Each structure stands twice: as structure tokens, then as C-alpha cells.
Amino acid sequence: MKKKAAVTIPSPHGRARLQPSRKALAPAARQLRFGSKWEYAPAPETVPVKIDPRHDLFIDGKFVAPRSKRYFDSINPATEEKLSEIAHAGAEDVDAAVQAARRAYDGVWSKMSGRDRGKYLFRIARIIQEKSRELAILETMDGGKPIKESRDFDLPMVAAHFFYHAGWADKLEFAFPGRSPRPLGVAGQIIPWNFPLLMAAWKIAPALACGNSVVLKPAETTSLTAMRLARIFQEAGLPAGVVNIVTGPGDTGAALVNHPGIDKIAFTGSTDVGKIIAKSCAGTNKRLTLELGGKAANIIMEDAPIDQAVEGIVSGIYFNQGHVCCAGSRLFVQEGVFKAVIHKLRDRIRTLRVGNPLDKNTDIGAINSRAQLEKINELVRSGKAEGADVEQSSCALPSKGYWFRPTFMTNITMSHRVAQEEIFGPVLAVMTFRTPEEAIERANNTPYGLSAGVWTDKGSKIFKMVSQLRAGVVWANCYNKFDPTSPFGGYKESGFGREAGLQGLAAYARVD
Amino acid sequence: MTLSVAKVSTPTIDQVMVEERAAAFTKRSIKAAAKLAGLKMAVAMMDLTTLEGKDTPGKVACLCRKALQPIEAKYEVPNCAAVCVYPSMVRCARRFLGERSPVRIASVATGFPSGQFPLRTRLEEVRRAAGDGADEIDMVIDRGAFLAGEHRKVFDEIVAVKQACGAAHLKVILETGELVTYDNVRAASDLAMQAGADFIKTSTGKIQPAATLPVTLVMLEAIRDYFFATGIRIGMKPAGGIRNAKQSLAYLVMVKETLGDDWLTPELFRFGASTLLNDVLMQIVKTTDGQYQSADYFSLS
């Protein structure tokens, strides 16, 4: 480097190294390149989590081997490797769990003051916070969801639900003024595999806050975090039998639903199974709440904030691999902005990183099971066969495990299967509309009614549309936002009853 | 040139979602080789800046030397993109850097930082700075006119400044901290690009808040829409408030995932900063050698 350089004042014009500015590229060349110019290095979550080779049932405060003597394998959907063996609870085991729950209900829990119940719930919430990193890793290994989501969404929400309901435990008289709320008894709770620990929290926390005891059945493919939660209950000193956890496939759930010692069934899962459960409970004294499938409409108006709406589309359908009952799986775009939205969506899905769920930069993890992957494949094939244009990102996929690229389909109509059936995967059905009235008519034209989204800059339009959409939750200029204070639940074949908020609390209390 | 609304339409911006999206970029985990490459890229994109009333030729010489070689050669750190100085310091910088320097000279002009001067003197200032050897002119818009709804006036002034620049590149500073809303930022971005800006830049550094991730995201999205509509690639320069290496990586992640690989170049992305450089260098040394060094081992500029 020369310290003394030329002293002459140069002319600013014609300096060779200046690039010509503002050169216009031809329309065909106006493409964004999302290539390998600056590749992110792998950033896997490294905290080792010890997983027991075998998981027994949690009954009466203890881990006990199943009387059925049967176990099944739980695998990591990202590697197809076996993580652990899970007990398959038979009818006898379910009976033991219900009896333990009954004893705990009669002997301890229903008699305990709300303030003391609250203390246990607060303690559980705090332990969950302390162990949230470990629980997040376990959730990701067991279910395939990205660590980013289990760390930043699932676990904070799990703790929030316990904290929220802990607060209610000694204030039920204020929640239902003048109606002396009492617990229902023993609640049988069956939860799905998409948010295993969060669904456990949604079910257990309000039940305990109101003074009920619980028999919980996690989904077959995702039992590990529920069993880790059982250990947290032990650590918190929760009285034996207040929460019992029975693992197993559908027949374990059926034994629980049909058990005469149950006072209340709460189920989150598919509409098909929900209908079977509703039939089983008919004519019994069991109370029932169902949170079932969905095929939510996400509606983009012409005056929407387009770039943010595209983010809402992405978080609506690609969050948790699309394994979300309230996923915005039907996109309705007003015709005037259709081209712009599709263009941006196409670019956006190219930046979604699919792969190792434990990598902190992964946006889309593994599909939860081979069966679910096959279901998604089948529906996308049917979409193609019915004439849809299928667009996918072209990212590389790992050689082992269950994967599906972020996908959207255009050139489809309301009568296509992919526009009607719940796919429960990262697959979006895109349709258009011309007027707000048409958008509402199409959005409501479904057997489901769990959720919907509306994107517009105009407040009056939001209120008008929200009042006409037949869905339990409608998000305006956002999507997939949750809070323990806000009730969640569906219309029509999406189920009945609400979870979270005051309405969710009412589902676990006798207030008549 | 006319203010055309047909070419690029200006959409509204939703505050909640744009801030959420911007925050998502900070969640990317940039490690190992990617971190080192990103940090070196950040150095190459830096407009090393001194904009103080007490600037002297000696201070500018220090800045130029630092920009030419930010740290010992063994760390293989590129030179900074430019030095950014007041118009009165352009000659000093050119004298120090010489005619064919890899480091460019950027000069703020047009009555920086307020822009509240007669257009005639602002244009004269631009011509002088360019004549003295500035490769790039960082102009400020008249925020008062913009907020009063006189968009046409702002547009015409940018056109005039662009002409006064000659061959020098024009960066248009919106001073987003004074525009306040994201809708204003978006509208001003569209206006500046249509009027002839080569770069759009967030801030002077004299007003708080200066550059933020969501404001920069709104501007990157405006650049994207302008590119789709016209085929012209406009550059982006967040300036002010970016003080540490981790922040700079979040900005680069945002550029990569919003505009793609083509914008990951000093030709189209710059950081306007003064204290950022040494923090980036500190991280480069740490990533290379495995340990942190005291600030005493990094020369001031």
C-alpha cells in the first residue's frame, strides 16, 4: 500500500472501476437466484438427551410394565431409527389407570383447595421451563418438527398453558360467578401427534385446575415427551393418580373411551375417529369435547399487505410441515393480485430449508410417519390426476426419513379433492375469487369450520368478513397465533367445545 | 422521467407481520465457515464512515488506511467498499487513496443531514463533491416535503441530484426514523427508485431510530418489486445503529433470503457504519484463532 499517492485531483467521470448503474434486464431475466453463494453451515442442536430404551405406563404415580406385556417401537421420522420401545396399554391397563384416577379424585384432588392445586400447576410450569431445551430436543426427535419450532413455539406455549391455568385454580368462583363450579371427575384425554406436549398441556392443565383427575393417551407415534412429562409430575410431587398416562394405538384409546369409569372425554384428532368417539359416548353420561380436522380458508384481498400476506400463507400452511388442524390449507386470492401472490410464493418456498429437524436453520422438518407421508403423496397424486398444476421447491432431501417438499397447487376448483379433503401436510390448494361475498361463500363451502384467515388493509372489511365466516378462529392479517387466554375450537365437522380461555375452563367444570 | 404509478404499485405494509418476519432472520444460526465468510463479506460491504464536525484530514487519512487494510493480511480480510465523508473531506480522501484505489469515496451531500437548504446550493454541493473525486453521493431527501405530501417535489429533487452526480452513483437517504411508518418508508423507497436512485439508504445516523431490520426489510421488498417491474437492480444500504457482528449477519441473512445471491455483493449492498468494523474483525480473529483478543489489538480508524 502506497502511503503517498497522487496528489492531482482526478476527474470523477469515466473512472474505470465504476459499474454502469441501473441497467435494465429483459423480463425473462428478472429472476431472483437463491443459490449457494453463501451457504449456512450445519447448526445442529447438540445437547445430548438420554432416551430410555423402554417406556412403561404411568399409573398411580409410578411407572409400571403393561399387563398386556406388549411394546411397540417409536421411531425418529427423520432417520427411521428406533428411539425407544413404548408400552401398549391393553384394556386391563386402562382400567387400572382409570381406577387410580378415581381414587386420586375421590381421595385427594377433588378435596384439595384451589390454591393448593394451583401451587402444583405453577410448580409443573416452572419445571417445564427449566427443562424446556431438553423437552424441545426430545419433541423434535420423536415427532420430526424443526427444533426452531419446538424451541420457540411448542415449549413456551406448553409452559404458558400451565401458568395460565395455575392462575385460575383458586379463582374459579370468579370465572363462573354465582355458579359454584365443581369438577367433573375423571377425564379421559386422547391427543394427536402434531403437537404432542402442547396438546397434553392444553388437556391436562385446565382439567387439573378445575379439580379433575386425568387419564391421558398420547398418539402412538409421539409418546416420549408425555412420558417425560410424567417424570416432571413426579418431580413436582403431584399426588399419585391425579394424572395417569397410558400409551398405545387406537385400541388403547377405544378402551379409554368405552370405560364406564370415565366422566369426560376430550379428543383432538381426525374427524373420522371423532365420529366414532361421539357414537361411543352417545347415551352415556360422559361429557365430550372434540377438536377435529379442518380445511381452513386463508383469504387474500386485493388491498392486503402483499409481502406480509405471503408470510402468512407460508406460516399458515408450512408451519409444522402442515401437520396443523387449523392450517390455512385453502388459499383464496382475489384475482387482481393472483399473479403477484403466486410469483412471491414461488420465490418464497425456495428459501424454505427442508431437512434435519435438529438443525437450528431447518424450516420444514420430517413428516411424522410413513403412513402420513403416503396419505400426502396420494392426495397430491389425485390433484395432478384431476388437472392441478403442482409447484414444489426443488431443495435436496435427506436419503433416509420421511420428507415432503413445500408444495402448492393452482388451476384447481372447489370440486377437486385437494380443495375439499384435509391433507395434513405442507400442501396448499390455491384458488381465486372476485368479490368479498364470493370469498365468504367459498370459504364456508366445506364440512369443516375450525379456522380462517383474512388479509386486507381495511378494518371494516375485516369485521364484516369475520362475522360471516363460519369458523371457530379467524385471524386477521396474521395466521396461527395462539394464546392460552384465547379459546380455540371448531364449527361443524371440526368438532365442538372450546379449549383455552374461560370457555376452555368451562369444559372441565360443572357449573349448572 | 415521470412519477409513474403504473410501473410499480406501492402496497401497504402490515407492521406486526413485517416485524415478525424481520425477527425471524435473527433466528438463523450462522456458524463456522459460514460465519467467517459472512463476516468477511460484511467488511467488503462496509462504507466506513466519519461524519463529525471535528473531522480533519488526519482523521480521514486514518479512515482511508483502515478501509484499505482493515487488519493484518494473514486474516485474508478484504478491503472495505468505501469511505464515507463530508464533501469538504473528499479531496483529502482522494489524495490519500489515489486514483485507482479499490476503496471508493462516498460523500454525503445535499445539506446533510437535514436537507433543509435551497435546492440550488444542494445541487452545487453535489457537483463539487463529485468534482472533487467522490465516486458515490449519499443524498438526503427533504423529509419535510415528503411528510407534507409533496411527493412530486421530492421526486424532482432526486432527479436533479441524479443529474448533478454525473457518473457518480447516487444513494438516496430516506431518514426512515423521521418517516416513522412503514407505509411511508415503502412509498419513499418506490419514489426514490423511480427518480433514479442507484441505492436506497435508511438513515443519516444522526436520528434515532436509524437502521432497523424491519425497515430494511420493507426497503428490500420495494427493491424486489422494482426489479420485477423494471429489471433494474437497486442497491440497499442500512446505516446507523448496526454496531456488532451478529447484527450484520442477520442483515446478510435477510438479503440472501429476500433478494437472493445477486444482491450479496458490495455493488448492491452496503453497511453504513463506523464502530461495526472492529467488532466484525474481533469476531473474525476469534473464529480464525479460537480466542478473543482485547480491543487494544484492533486499530482505531
Image (cartoon, grey):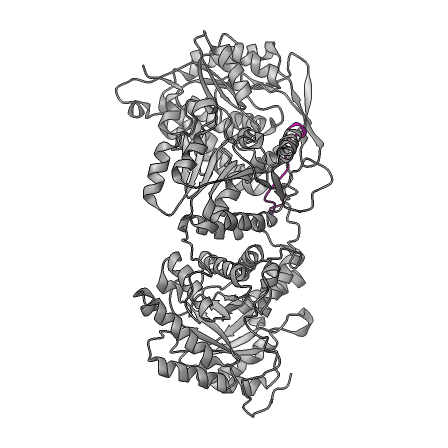
Magenta segment, prevailing SS (helix, strand or loop): loop
Indicate the quadrant containing the N terminus of chain B: top left, top right, bottom left or bottom right.
bottom left
Q: Quadrant of residue A114?
A: top left
Against A163, residue B98 (above or below) is: below
For this orientation, the residue located farthest to the right is: A399
Magenta stretch holds residue A234: no
B187 vs A22: above or below: above
Residue at image coords 36%, 32%: A468
Q: Is residue A448 left or right of residue A3?
A: left
Q: In screen coordinates, is B187 left or right of A20?
A: left
Q: Residue furthest left?
A: A178
Q: Is B32 on the left-hand or right-hand side of A176?
A: right
Q: Position of residue B255 (x, y in %)?
A: 55, 59
Observer-nearest of A24 and A227 = A24
> Residue B89, position in %: x, y?
47, 84
- Can you say whether B126 is above or below B214 in the image? below
Q: Nearer the viewer, residue B1 or B260?
A: B1
Residue bounds of the magenta highlight: A359-372
* Residue A56 spot, x, y in % from top left: 63, 20
Q: Position of residue A57 (x, y in %)?
A: 60, 19
Q: Residue furthest bottom?
A: A8
Residue A223 in view in this figure? yes
Residue at 58% from the left image edge and 24% from the top image edge: A219
Q: Can the viewer see residue B292?
A: no
What is the count of numbered marks?
A: 0
Front in this rendered view, residue B145 or A337 = A337
